[in-house]
Image (tube, grey):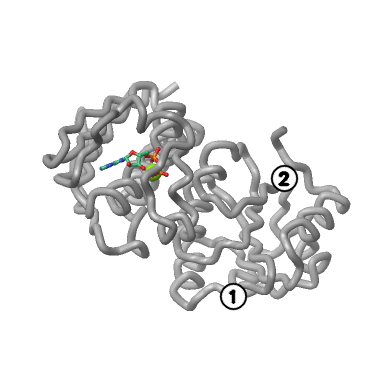
Amino acid sequence: MKISQAAQILEGTILCCEEFKDREVISACGSDMMSDVLAYAKDQAVLITGLCNPQVIRTAVMMDMLCIIFVRGKMPTEEMIELAKEREIVLISTPRRMFSACGKLYQAGLVPGGY
Amino acid sequence: MAECVHLEYRVDGNNFVSAGTATESVKSFLKNMGVDPKDVRRVAIAMYEGEINMVIHANGGYAYADIYVDKCIITLVDTGKGIADIELAMQPGYSTASDEVRALGFGAGMGLPNMKKYADECIIESEVGKGTKVTLVTNFS
Ligand SMILES: Nc1ncnc2c1ncn2[C@@H]1O[C@H](COP(=O)(O)OP(=O)(O)O)[C@@H](O)[C@H]1O
Ligand SMILES: [Mg+2]
């Protein structure tokens, strides 16, 4: 699906890099522990997380991810948005909680890309 | 291109925001060099975990990258508190990180295991009270 569709499904707000919202994403991973993302993620293009600090952006960069979705209405700081912009990573904030956000996207066809 | 490129970075121990900049710089260098993206990511993950460790456990240090045509050697050197039992520290889940660090998304005790998993060689030398040196060798496929 397109990043814009993911945002729509989650009633989320795109916070930056709107120009890349048509990028296609196939798989996602959800975690609040960045080391787990680094250990287990494969080629997931989307990171769904309740953690909100600059290292979330860095982790996504290391994993070549295209989009980060913050759950529970978490709002990244200006500093984080700047980091994401420079690296062309789309940031989305959704009021949904982790389980519900993951479930909705799974149902809509995003795959886990791992076990 | 020269036979070996040497890159050096100071890693600020008090700055959780800038943590990862050294790794990002090495990552883009390797990418621009045309290294296989899978190998670039392996280097990036292992180095990033090491860089984060220097920030959260050792009050910063220095990161060096020696890049050859067929491999990359990352060396992370700090003068922090050192690791008393390296074998124990290598166990998945083992961590002495504070709750504060954990709330930042690290401190799951997966850093050293991740380095071992992604690098072809991971050498840890440490002396309590003196510091730690981590060497990560990644061969390009
Ligand atoms: N550079 C370092 N200096 C001092 N201690 C370290 C360093 N790197 C790792 N350690 C020790 O090894 C433990 C395990 O490291 P790691 O696997 O990265 O887990 P984590 O960083 O999540 O605690 C740390 O909790 C810490 O006690
Ligand atoms: Mg660690």
Residue A111 visible in this rendered orientation of the protein: yes
Residue annotated with mark 2: A27
Q: Of tags 1 and 2, which is closer to the observer?
A: 1
* Amino acid at circle 1: Met
Q: Residues within 10 Å of mark 1 (few under 14, many from 20)?
A: some
Query: Is B33 situated above or below B105?
Result: above
Query: Is A42 situated above or below B101?
Result: above
Question: How far from the left and from the top, in percent, is residue A6?
Answer: 77, 61
Label 1 vs 2, first from the N-terminus:
2
Q: Residue at x 67, y 71 (%)?
A: A93
Ligand 1 located in image quadrant? top left
Question: How far from the left and from the top, in percent, is residue B47?
Answer: 35, 40
Residue found farthest to the right: A107
Residue annotated with mark 1: A75
* Amino acid at circle 2: Ser
Q: What chain does badge 1 belong to?
A: A
Q: What secondary structure is found at the residue carrying circle 1?
A: loop
Assess mark 2: CB under 8 A from ligand 1? no
Q: What chain does badge 2 belong to?
A: A
Measure the C-alpha gap from mark 1 to mark 2.
23 Å
* Residue A87 vs residue B49, the one in the foreground: B49
Q: Residue at x 69, y 57 (%)?
A: A23
Q: Residue at x 19, y 53 (%)?
A: B10
